[in-house]
Amino acid sequence: MKTKVVVVEDEALLLMMAVAIVEEAGFEALEARNADEALMLFERVPGIRILFTDIDMPGSMDGLMLARAVRDRWPPVEIIIVSGMKQPDAGALPERGVFFSKPYDTRQLTNALLRMAA
């Protein structure tokens, strides 16, 4: 069974690219366009192992708030946070959270996914 990864990105083209990276790494990608959709996936789909989220997005919370909510409710989930706008300081990241600046290096991102799933 493939490792499930929730990919949260509000820009359609970037969502497609992120999903392609996740699937090419051998994972099952579950798409969400905002934090609310992502949380619904976590509540409805068992066995999600990784959250891959952008910081800047519309809706009730940004990616950092989403990451903290996931860390609180689903502690085993690994978290990757990306942004082309913000560089959060280490204290803003949830425990074990990893940050990548956009545009991210596909190989580095794939290696992080594989490490988290191991």
Image (tube, rainbow, N blue to C red):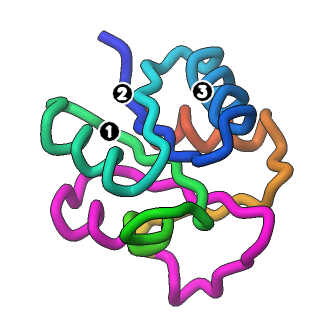
- The segment highlighted magenta reads 68-93
Q: Are marks 1 and 2 in contact (CB under 8 Å)?
A: yes
- Circle 2 sits on which residue? 4
Q: Secondary structure at mark 1?
A: strand
First in sequence: mark 1 vs mark 2: 2
Hey, which quadrant is residue 59 in on the image?
A: bottom left
Q: Which label sits in the foreground, 3 or 2?
A: 3
Which residue is tagged 1? 49
Compared with 4, 111 (above or below) is below
Separation of residues labelled 1 and 3 (CA atoms): 15 Å
Q: Is residue 56 above or below residue 79?
A: below
Which structural element holds mark 3? helix
Whether pointer 3 and pointer 2 mark residues with C-beta atoms closer than 8 Å, the reply is: no
Q: Which residue is painted at 72% across and 29% down in the image?
A: 17
Residue 53: where, in percent of width, then height?
Answer: 53, 53
In the rendered structure, find residue 19 and report the number of the disc placed on it. Answer: 3
Task: Answer with mark 3 or mark 2, whichever residue precedes in sequence.
Answer: 2
Tell me if label 1 and label 3 are in contact, CB under 8 Å: no
> Between tags 1 and 3, which lies in front?
3
Q: In the image, what residue type sits under mark 3?
A: Val
